[in-house]
């Protein structure tokens, strides 16, 4: 195979493009700029850490089934771990969002980073909602019957039914987490490629 | 034991308590979480980060 043919292969082009956009020193950097030494920058990684606990506790709940936590002390513990890691996930994500909003974090060609963050946030809300309707208790019955009226009034009820437990559980444990995790991965890769957004430049008075 | 003490502080039995003000209708639980987020956000802006040198030192 000639070098021209190798150059035209999609694998070659993709590898070169990836290596150009994300060289190893950007993918796993040794240091960060001095301005990152602030508490406001820790909430992104706090969100990621909470997401890891959410996924791991969700794996265990998926292994044992949606009713396990009603009949087992360990099940109740894992279910609580899942709930509280979701609480921390949203708590940290909202502060991360506020911080990035006031930093105008879409500056410097970072608009897609901002957009993937916003879409991940919206997907996470849908994931949490389908989790609340999958609790298999009176709370989930109440939430799903109330949500049904609201969602049907928008017309979205023709695409899905929040009273369909199987459908909502599959959305909660397969479709929505998959989308959320893929978007989160893309978001982190974009942050790595473009770097953390710098603060606004300080105004220097002329002397 | 600690769990029982905490449960005694905030009773989770019965209907939730709600804050009403004009069109705003929100549970005190959600209101508390929002207040904690605001406090954490402000603290994150002003609490010094460990190991960070001040601007005077860097000049």
Image: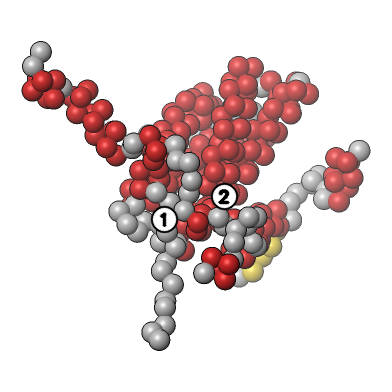
- In the rendered image, residue A172, in percent from the top left (x then y), is placed at 51, 30
Going 82% across and 50% down the picture, which residue do you hit? Answer: B10
In the rendered image, which residue does mark 1 sit on? A197
- Closer-to-camera residue (A48/A60): A48
Give the quadrant of residue B53.
bottom right
Disc 1 sits on a residue from what chain? A
Disc 2 sits on a residue from what chain? A
- In the rendered image, residue A88, in percent from the top left (x then y), is placed at 63, 44
- Closer-to-camera residue (A148/A46): A46
- Closer-to-camera residue (A106/B21): A106
Going 62% across and 65% down the picture, which residue do you hit? Answer: B46
- In the rendered image, residue A119, in percent from the top left (x then y), is placed at 40, 45
Is B25 situated left or right of A96 in this image?
A: right
Residue A42: mark: 2
Element carrying mark 2: helix
Is residue A82 depicted above or below A4 in this figure?
Answer: below
Query: Are discs 2 and 1 both within one chain?
Result: yes
Is residue B41 at all visible to an observer of this figure? no
Is B24 situated left or right of A148 in this image?
A: right
Going 42% across and 78% down the picture, which residue do you hit? Answer: A204
- In the rendered image, residue A86, in percent from the top left (x then y), is placed at 60, 39
Image colouring: secondary structure
CA separation in Å, label 2 and label 1 = 14 Å
The image shows a total of numbered marks equal to 2
Is residue A102 at all visible to an observer of this figure? yes
- Earlier in the chain: of badge 2 and badge 1, it is 2
Is A111 situated left or right of A167 in this image?
A: left
Give the quadrant of residue A75.
top right
């Amino acid at each position: 195979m000639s070098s021209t043919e190798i150059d035209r292969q999609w694998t070659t082009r993709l590898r070169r493009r990836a290596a150009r956009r994300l060289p190893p020193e950007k993918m796993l950097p040794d240091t960060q700029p001095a301005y990152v030494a602030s508490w406001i920058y820790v909430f992104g990684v706090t969100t990621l850490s909470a997401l890891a606990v959410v996924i791991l506790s969700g794996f265990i709940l998926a292994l044992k089934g949606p009713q396990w936590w009603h009949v087992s002390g360990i099940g109740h513990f894992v279910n609580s771990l899942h709930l509280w890691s979701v609480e921390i996930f949203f708590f940290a994500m909202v502060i991360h969002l506020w911080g990035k909003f006031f930093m105008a974090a879409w500056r410097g060609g970072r608009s897609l980073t901002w957009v993937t963050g916003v879409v991940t946030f919206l997907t996470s809300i849908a994931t949490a909602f389908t989790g609340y309707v999958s609790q298999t208790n009176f709370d989930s019955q109440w939430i799903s019957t109330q949500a049904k009226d609201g969602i049907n009034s928008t017309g979205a009820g023709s695409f899905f039914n929040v009273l369909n437990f199987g459908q909502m559980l599959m959305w909660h444990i397969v479709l929505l987490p998959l989308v959320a995790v893929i978007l989160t991965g893309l978001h982190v890769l974009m942050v790595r490629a473009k770097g953390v957004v710098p603060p606004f430049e300080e105004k220097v008075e002329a002397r | 034991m600690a769990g029982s003490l905490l449960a005694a502080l905030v009773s989770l039995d019965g209907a939730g308590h709600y804050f009403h003000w004009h069109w705003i209708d929100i549970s005190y639980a959600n209101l508390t979480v929002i207040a904690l987020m605001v406090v954490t956000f402000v603290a994150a802006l002003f609490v010094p980060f460990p190991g960070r040198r001040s601007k005077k030192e860097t000049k």
